[in-house]
Amino acid sequence: MSALPMSMDAGLPADLPGRIAVLGLARSGLALSEALLERGVSVAAGDARKAPDLEGVEALSGRAELFLGGPGDGFLDGAGWLAISPGVPLDAPVVDEARARGIPVYAEVEVAYRIAEAEAPGAHRWIAITGTNGKSTTTTWIAEMLRRAGRPVALAGNIGAPLSGFLRERGGRDFVCEMSSFQLEAIDRFHPHVAVLTNITPDHLDRYASFADYAAAKARVFARQGPGDFAVVNADDPAAMAAPTRARRILFSRRARPETGVWVEAGNLLSNVGPGLHEVLPLERLALPGAHNLENAMAAAAAAECLGTPPAAILDALTRFEGLPHRTELVAQSRGVRWVDDSKGTNVDATAKSLEGFPDGSVVLILGGRDKHGDFEGLRPLVARRAKAVLTIGEAAAAIERALSGAAALERCGTMDAAVARAAILARPGDTVLLSPACASFDQYGNYEERGRHFAGLARAAAETFHGA
């Protein structure tokens, strides 16, 4: 399991059209437009928003044909492909029109992958990570392991850095890509040598007709793999295990020893992915607490071992990784009360796994936001055990209160400011105020990061006030 051979027969994809329509001008759409323009491709750049609401779009002025506030008539004229950003649904009218015209529709990551492979054939290793929860932490952990092994790494995809943004550097590298279901819906040739599926639990059911459709989108991460590739799968997750793959299946489990994979035994993380059975590390040395982070660590270690990463680099990353913002991040502490930002907990399963990491009766839980049609009743057992109070915010407040009535003391606060102020009154030494909303942020915030930053600022102010008192 060593690095791939490096060859540098540069060129563009043979089927790259002379004109491409790019829909959605957030980070990935802007990065792809730039990459295409640099390669002499004519770009029609479109977005439903107008210029004042689009940061960075001025860089395309005079170079690309802009279709803003629509896009309107002529956007698809002459385009060989329609490239879409992750936020563009596949049933959008422009997408329907493209298909009616026979124009292929591809995700930004698909187009960037084709360019990268054409310009440096066989020079890259591709690692793709998807799942409902844990994919960002797992993706970053894998990248850290490879970096500590001295590999050139590009951390890209849904984690925030568009794959297209790395196309200016054409040397071989390890592309470690977080992939959302939205991105996977519109891939075609994208072929990861190692693909990781952390789990599949109900999410985004406001976009998908059924859980089966959502699971099928996640399973597309394995679509182009063959027997020489690796599929790293959560053996404890039935939906993930049901995903079809032709690749060699490498499993990770907290509950049992898989035939080939990574597992927990007698307080240690063990593996037989590489040569022979060996210890990865004692669990007490793992940098991040919680059952969900144990699963993330196992997935990352399994993927890194599939790539032939030295054990010392894996151990170093597992013991030194500091975690990511807004993922069970301790943001304030005073008078024995901890304030934890898990704003990335945007679905019921993520919130449940976050709650698992706290003592019974110790959590003042802030829930709510925009409902993604999650089953809030699934939180009842954990809320009843772990929460001393639940404070609701946002559009989903009423639905959450109906689902959790009687499980814990419930109070509707409406806004984050009100919820934090009330939490500061309710929390006692030994308690944790936990923002883990089980909802999207878009009713009151631009994204989960903005929501997390707002909570963290309020939490620090509350902690300082009580500390001073």
Image: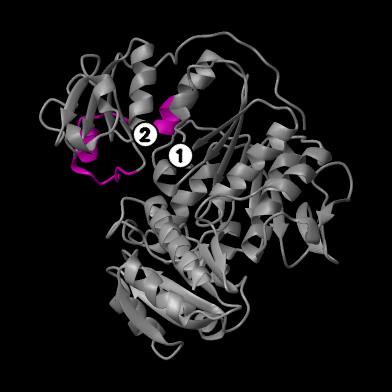
Q: Are there few (<14), some (14-19), or many (20+) residues within 10 Å of tag 2? A: some
The residue positioned 29% from the left and 42% from the top of the image is 88
The answer to whether 316 appears left or right of 70 in the picture is right
| Residue 336, picture quadrant | bottom right
For the residue labelled by badge 1, is the local secondary structure a helix, a strand or a loop?
A: loop
Query: With respect to residue 441, does 12 lie above or below?
Result: above
* Badge 1: residue crowd in 10 Å (few <14, some 14–19, many ≥20): few
Front residue (pair 168, 251) = 168
Q: Residue at x 30, y 13 (%)?
A: 18
Asked whether disc 2 touches disc 1, contact meaning CB atoms under 8 Å apart, the reply is: yes
Which percent across, then down, holds residue 329?
55, 58
Name the amino acid type tagged 2.
Arg
Depth check: give the residue in front, 364 or 443.
364
Residue that mark 1 sits on: 160
Q: How many marks?
A: 2
Q: Residue under circle 2?
A: 27
Question: Which is more toward the observer, 390 or 242?
Answer: 390
Chain part drawn in magenta = 87-112
Magenta segment: does it hold 380? no
Instruction: Indicate the position of residue 107 as horizontal and vertical percent values.
Output: 38, 35
Q: Is residue 134 left or right of residue 82?
A: right
Question: Residue lying furthest left in this view?
Answer: 73
Position in image of residue 170 (x %, y %): 55, 15
Q: For this view, does 249 lie left or right of residue 117?
A: right
